[in-house]
Image (spheres, rainbow, N blue to C red):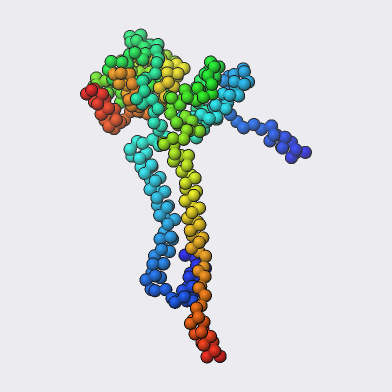
Amino acid sequence: MRILGLLLGLLLAMPAFAVNPSERLADPALEARARTLSQELRCLVCQSESIDDSNAELAHDLRVLVRERLTAGDTDQQVLDYLHARYGDYVLLNPPVERATLLLWFGPGVVLVLVLAGLAVVARRRRPAVPSPLNKDERARLDALLRDGR
Amino acid sequence: MSPPETLASEEAGAVQAGPAPDAADHDGRRRLIFALLPAAGFLLLVAFFATTLVKEEFFGHNPAELPSAMIDKPAPEFALPALVDDRPGLATADLRGAPHLVNFYASWCVPCRQDHAMLNGFALSGQIPIEGIAYKDTPAASKRFLGEFGDPYERVGVDADGRTAIDFGLYGVPETYLVDAAGQIRYRWVGPLTPEGLEHEILPRLAALQSK
């Protein structure tokens, strides 16, 4: 019974968000768009969080700004462009692929390929060398040795 | 490296004609290089972290500092009400005609006190007008701050909701922007201004702007 209660409690537990009730829009569709956008925007103060997660004052201001622009009729892309123009790639948690972000996007993949290649080389080296079969002369000598040794 | 490999290569060597002595030497050197590879990688990491730490500790470099996306773009359109009675507020048009510094401050911002001490001294030199923007603060607190820590500003605008700051791409106070005579943002200094920052970053850029 206690375990059941615990499980039910876990079901009820929701992840914590920083969005204040006062920030929410009355229109659920707009609010949903605002939430999705907020999760793609990086908080510039606590740089490992989105503005949706962050309690920083600036994150609050940006959440309100996103909602204002959506209410004013901006598309999602227009809102992202608005902030990108002011804060650059750093404000996007999903930055565009361009020269400055190539390392960011493909660096991990390149490292993975290099490591796999290195492992393959090492594995190949480790395989014990197979001795080449004896040629006719060697076979004759071996036979002779075996015969004499007996 | 590991015992099985040693055994295998010795066996192979015994069955085959037997490796020449310098071949075995070459093999040993290669094994040594492989054994030192992880240590070399570790040293590389240490060097990387040490550089960042030393830069932060001794050269005031902040690894979390972001480049401004507003460099070489026109300063945003704004018109802020005046904070103090004896001087007007601040608007985009006020920045045209000559280079200006635009400094964001707040009374609740502790590093701003240090920043202000630098700005007060620099303002005395009269090399460039410094404009102030009181970021997200009550006018009373902003005024009290100027009374307490000095007032280096030619004009002071009130940015109560912080929207003008967002248009500048600000992400913390204090921040100082160098705006050229055409109203374009040329440089941003994040955090309290230091003597080194003034000497090596702001003044050379200002000299370049004024020589044009």
Residue B192 at x, y percent in the picture: 35, 28
| Total numbered labels | 0
B33 or A120, nearer to the observer: A120
Residue B166 at x, y percent in the picture: 44, 22
Direction right: furthest residue = A1
A74 or B142, nearer to the observer: A74
Q: Is residue A57 visible?
A: no
Q: Is residue B182 above or below residue B192?
A: above
Direction front: furthest residue = A136
Q: Is residue B59 above or below residue B107?
A: below
Residue A137 at x, y percent in the picture: 48, 82
Left or right: where A123 falls relative to B44: right
Task: Using the rendered view, name the quadrant where residue A38 is placed.
Answer: top right
Q: Residue at x 39, y 18 (%)?
A: B76
Q: Residue at x 26, y 30 (%)?
A: B199
B109 or B189, nearer to the observer: B189
Q: Residue at x 40, y 15 (%)?
A: B78
Task: Using the rendered view, name the quadrant where residue B164 is placed.
Answer: top left
Q: Quadrant of the C terminus of chain B?
A: top left
Left or right: where B102 falls relative to A53: left
Q: Is residue B52 visible?
A: yes
Q: Residue at x 51, y 20 (%)?
A: A65
Residue A24 at x, y percent in the picture: 59, 20
